[in-house]
Image (cartoon, rainbow, N blue to C red):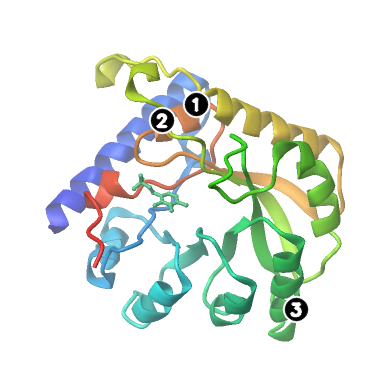
Amino acid sequence: MADIIIENVARIKEEVIGACAQAGRSSGEVKIVPATKTVSPERINLLLDCGIDTIGENRVQELMEKYDALDKRFHIHFIGKLQTNKVKYIIDKVEMIQSVDSLKLCAEISKRAKAIGKCMEVLIEVNIGHEESKSGVMPEELLKFVEEAAKYDGIKIVGLMVIPPAISSENRSEGSDSQKVYNCGAYFKKVKELSLDILNKNIDNVIMRELSMGMSSDYCEAVSCGATIIRPGRAIFGERIYK
Ligand SMILES: *Cc1c(COP(=O)(O)O)cnc(C)c1O
């Protein structure tokens, strides 16, 4: 079990280094933040031996259940759909909320963070594919949203997060690992452009340090399009087993 996780992380790191080299980026710019939903704390803790110190959890209830058994050296990001009434449970446990998509949520995070003297880093989730089934701010509304969200104290907007529409396998780039041609996903490129648009507006309380994009099937493409955080899950832990 441990061996597989260590091997998988090592492979992903190599691939990230390769994708960065191709894109003319430094691999130090990319952080691997494994998505650990359904994974036990015992297995998550093995990540520390691979040099991974930040993880992404999706569900409040699951995070609460695992929290005590998680090694305290981990930094935890919240990456799932977050209900306003659950913010209070995680405010002291996570270092970043990557999935902010409503001003109501901003207001609640702001209130709870201020109450404990914290400034919460947040990413704004973008619904880049205009998918009804997905959360996130529509690209057309993003700039306006960021301007409004930036007015809350107790939160700091540090970038964008995206889960692009699933792309069928025939549209993906082919090739052996050593000579993969990374065909930047159009969606990732759009998100990068949106982040540059926001950056150019010089909005107070907003920086565009992070672009969280790329999961198990597309992290190399995401890296070549400018991702600073990738969130592989199955590529590290194998298929998820839901209880
Ligand atoms: C589950 C999940 C991932 C990881 O997905 P994989 O396909 O297992 O890599 C990444 N980001 C979010 C927000 C997720 O919910």
- Coordinates of residue 119 in the picture (x, y in percent): 71, 71
Do the residues under discs 3 and 1 have CB atoms within 8 angstroms? no
Q: Provide the residue designation for mark 3.
A: 111
* CA–CA distance in space, label 1 to label 2: 6 Å
- Coordinates of residue 19 in the picture (x, y in percent): 42, 26
Number of other residues with Cα within 10 Å of mark 1, as a class: few under 14, some 14 to 19, many 20 or more: many
Give the side of residue 182 with respect to residue 112, left or right.
left
For badge 3, the amino acid type reads Lys
Residue 33 is marked as none
For badge 2, the amino acid type reads Cys
Residue drawn at (40%, 60%) of the image: 53
Give the side of residue 2 with respect to residue 142, left or right.
left
Work out whether residue 121 or residue 132 is closer to the camera in this orientation and state it.
132
Give whichever of discs 3 and 1 has the lower sequence position. 3
Mark 3 residue element: helix
Foreground tag (3 vs 1):
3
Residue drawn at (26%, 62%) of the image: 242
- Coordinates of residue 49 in the picture (x, y in percent): 26, 59
Work out which residue is located at the far front of the displayed protein and give it: 132
Work out whether residue 130 or residue 48 is closer to the camera in this orientation and state it.
130
Residue drawn at (25%, 55%) of the image: 240
Asked if residue 97 shows in the view, the reply is yes
Q: Provide the residue designation for mark 1.
A: 224
Work out whether residue 27 or residue 234 is closer to the camera in this orientation and state it.
234
For badge 1, the amino acid type reads Ser
* CA–CA distance in space, label 3 to label 1: 37 Å
Picture quadrant of residue 105? bottom right
Asked if residue 9 shows in the view, the reply is no
Do the residues under discs 1 and 2 have CB atoms within 8 angstroms? yes
Mark 1 residue element: helix
Q: Provide the residue designation for mark 2.
A: 220
